[in-house]
Each structure stands twice: as C-alpha cells, then as structure tokens.
Image (cartoon, rainbow, N blue to C red):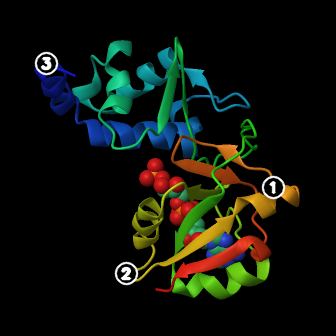
Amino acid sequence: MDFKDDDRAREIGLTRLSKAVSRALRHEPWLFELELDEHGWTSTDGLLEALRREIPEWSDLELADLPMLIDFAAKPRHEIQGQRIRALYGHSTPGAIALVAATPPAELFHGTSPESIGSIFSGGLQPMSRQYVHMSADAETAVRVGSRKSKHPVILTIDTVAALASDVTFYRGSDMVWLARHVPAEFIRILRAG
Ligand code: HQG
C-alpha cells in the first residue's frame, strides 16, 4: 500500500465503510437490496451501487477501492473474487450460509462473559444470534472478543481433536477465525476465569 491508498482510505472513511459492508454481507443484505447465495457471495456491482447511495463520500466508490477493506484491516473479514464479494464469517442472515468443513488447530479459543458460563456448560456453545459459534486460533483474539461482552472475560479452550472424533464439524472463517454450528460442553475447558 502506498501513500495514495492511505489518502484514499481516509477520504472514504475505511472503518465506516467496513462496518457498512459487514452489515450488508453479514446481517441485513435486504437493506442494501442485495441477495446472498448459499455461500454468502453477492456481486460487487450491486454492493457498490448500494454503497454509493449511502453517503456523499462514497458516491464515486469503485471496484478498485474494495481491496483496501481487506488490506487495511487488522484481520480479514471479507473476501473478493473477481466480481463477487462475501463476508468470511459473522453472518446472522436467515438461511444458513454453507461453508467448507476443514480441520482446525488442535485447540481453539473462545472469550465470553462470566454470566454465560453456566449456560455454556449445560448446553454447550450455541450460535445465539449468528449462524455459527465463533472461535479463534489464538487466545489473544478470544480475550479481545470476550472483552466486548465483559470487563473480565472468561477464556475457554475447545479440544477440537476430541470434538472431531465425535463428529463435530468445524469450518474455516479465516486463518484466525473458526466456526461450528454447536460445540458440546464436554469439549470445553476454562483456560482463564474472568
Ligand atoms: C455466548 C467478531 C449463553 C458467546 C469476533 C458470546 C468473533 C452463550 C455470545 C465474532 C452460549 C454471542 C463473533 C450459551 C454461546 N449460553 N451464552 N449456550 N453459547 N454464548 O457477538 O463469539 O470483529 O454473537 O460466548 O472476532 O462474541 O466483528 O459472538 O458471548 O469472531 O469481525 O453468546 O465477532 O468478529 O455473541 O463474536 P456474538 P462472539 P468481528
């Protein structure tokens, strides 16, 4: 990325743009008159058209601006392939988005609030308002995610080797983010209490 990109990123307000794209691709595509296919893809043309209408700063948004969303983010949230774009994870849209099953690292992490622990250890990790339970490959991300829920998040580890052996399916969101429809309590341990 050169200085020109930096200026452009500021001009279009990249954080605000990333939030709008996540809203369109994870949560409320209909507000942007978009339809997602079963893998979460939608056309970049449709997305750009909707974004150009959102705020004046985005009225000249082009396809070439979209890769900045990925390049400037601390972690990838979106994926672009030619003329189509999708969110890698985080979906709450009705109708499950089908992801490809994959083998995760032997241990995954999940940060949550102390208040949720009782329910997690009785019913396992549930997707709640999203389509999938979200876990991370590193403990630091779990601390950050858990800190959005509580000042003193509880950090859980998931034994994916045992879970895979019991037919729990994992899906890769990105290198760092892994997903599952449900993680039974027997595979979950407390790494750090809140
Ligand atoms: C909890 C971010 C009670 C769960 C992050 C969590 C993440 C239960 C909350 C992604 C439960 C759901 C998602 C049960 C789970 N009983 N509570 N049985 N099972 N919970 O926000 O995982 O930065 O929907 O522990 O990186 O916090 O936006 O999910 O506290 O990957 O790109 O229910 O969002 O990505 O909360 O975060 P959320 P999350 P971005």
Query: x%, y% of residue 173?
Result: 59, 42
Which of disc 2 and disc 1 is earlier in sequence?
Answer: 2
Mark 3, other Cα within 10 Å: few <14 / some 14–19 / many ≥20: few
Q: Is residue 118 depicted above or below 93 in this figure?
A: below
Q: Secondary structure at mark 1?
A: helix
| Separation of residues labelled 3 and 2 (CA atoms) | 39 Å
What is the three-letter code of the residue carrying label 2?
A: Lys
| Separation of residues labelled 1 and 3 (CA atoms) | 47 Å
Between marks 1 and 2 in the image, the one whose residue lies nearer the viewer: 1
Query: x%, y% of residue 151?
Result: 37, 81
Q: Identify the residue position indicated by label 2 in the image.
A: 151
Which of disc 2 and disc 3 is earlier in sequence?
Answer: 3
Q: Is residue 131 depicted above or below 149 in this figure?
A: above
Answer whether residue 104 is visible to the viewer in this image.
yes
Query: What residue lies at 69% left-to-right and 74% top-to-bottom?
Result: 188
Q: Identify the residue position indicated by label 1 in the image.
A: 164
Query: What residue lies at 56% left-to-right and 64% top-to-bottom?
Result: 109
Kindly indicate the quadrant of the structure image that contains residue 134. bottom right
Q: Identify the residue position indicated by label 3 in the image.
A: 4
Kindly indicate the quadrant of the structure image that contains residue 157. bottom right
What is the three-letter code of the residue carrying label 1?
A: Leu
In the rendered structure, find residue 79 and report the number of the disc placed on it: none
Q: Nearer the viewer, residue 170 or 113?
A: 170
Mark 2, other Cα within 10 Å: few <14 / some 14–19 / many ≥20: few
Kindly indicate the quadrant of the structure image that contains residue 43. top right
Quadrant where the N terminus is found in the figure:
top left
